[in-house]
Amino acid sequence: MTTLSIRATAAWFGPGRLIEDAQVVCDGGTITYAGEATDIGHADRDLALDGFLMPAVADRHVHIELSNPSAVLAGGVTAVRDLAWPVERIFALADASEMPSFDGPLIKAAGPMLTAPGGYPTQDSWAPPGTGREIEGTDDATAAVEELARLGAAAIKVSLNAEAGPTPADGELSAICDAAHTADLPVTAHAQGKGQVERALGAGVDELAHTPWIRLSDEVIQTAALRLRIVSTLDILSFGHDTPEIRTALDNLRRFHVAGGSIAYGTDLGNGEIPPGIHTREAQLMVEAGLEPEEVLEAMIRAPLAPDAPADMVVLRTSPLDDLRALDDVSLVIRAGRVVAGR
Ligand SMILES: [Zn+2]
């Protein structure tokens, strides 16, 4: 294995771990040391950087084939989770992405979205045939989840988009959740339309793939904060503009955060004009929803820098804890212990 040592004038390793004159040593794709700079022998490659080192970013909601994997990686995102794409295409790409030499992020995938016959996204122009898997009955629901688990799915995505067509029945939804949990897979839901978040909560869904943009009652927010995680995807509701949808979503996420709910960074990359790589405006919207900058970073990273963690890092010119706009200026990207972008 090739060893790499990085020294940086400042670093944030993870929550509560801001370090001056920091050093991280990697052996292949794994970190073996992360702490204050120390003399611990020679690595195959030594980098000494005047910059701010932090863990690389994971985008937990993408449609990678609608974007540019190479640009995603060069922009500081070393891992993504694809939340709806045809089986034949996405799992082969996910397998290929495990190679350290892959020119893109590590890809985890849900495969197709489980939906009702004719339901979202089967009629939508962005979605190639096979992006939705139409479920017919509870046995079929169970079989679909078991097949995706065999193919290597990292999560099960279910469509509860009642504004774009029919959705799986309650029994089918419960069967999906039961089969997923038996296979140790989380269920993430696209919940859109009146009462759909409530249905997700009732069935045991683990995550909402978007911050909902119709107002949720305080009671629903309280229950949701205890039971599921929300993937932010705020900027698809605004693209930098003030809209009724972004105001309502921010209000929902603000109350969810106050109630102690867990929030993950995700952009829905592939949907509209979301740029590849770290999307600073998404991070800034999370601040508008009441998260501290450090909480935003925590929601964005793949994993804190520590021994045995993946050797995925970025170097910025200045600290994003002072101003999140620092995320716009990525000078170096390391994936699996290899410098993949920058000097
Ligand atoms: Zn999506």
Image (cartoon, rainbow, N blue to C red):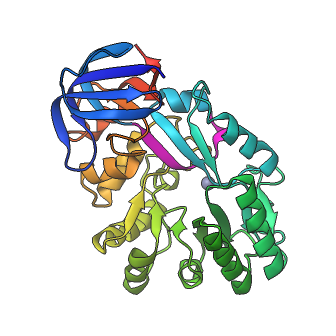
Magenta stretch bounds = 56-67
Q: Based on the picture, tell me whether residue 62 belongs to the magenta stretch.
A: yes
Q: Nearer the viewer, residue 172 or 235?
A: 172
Q: Based on the picture, tell me whether residue 192 belongs to the magenta stretch.
A: no
- Percent across and percent down for residue 202 are 56, 85
- Percent across and percent down for residue 278 are 44, 37
Q: Vertical placement of 8 versus 114: above or below?
A: above
Left or right: 311 as drawn, with respect to 315: right
Whether residue 327 is visible, yes or no, is yes
Left or right: 156 as drawn, with respect to 15: right
Q: Vertical placement of 222 versus 287: above or below?
A: below
Quarter of the render that holds ligand 1: bottom right
Q: Residue at point 57% right, 66% down? A: 186
As drawn, the residue found furthest toward the left would be 20
Q: How many marks?
A: 0
Q: Vertical placement of 221 versus 342: above or below?
A: below
Q: Vertical placement of 283 versus 323: above or below?
A: below
Q: Nearer the viewer, residue 136 or 219?
A: 136
Whether residue 120 is visible, yes or no, is no
- Percent across and percent down for residue 29 are 47, 31
Q: Residue at point 67% right, 67% down? A: 158
Q: Residue at point 33% right, 40% down? A: 307
Q: Quadrant of residue 205?
A: bottom right
Q: Residue at point 29% right, 30% down? A: 53
Left or right: 330 as drawn, with respect to 104: left
Q: Nearer the viewer, residue 321 or 250?
A: 321
- Percent across and percent down for residue 319 are 23, 34
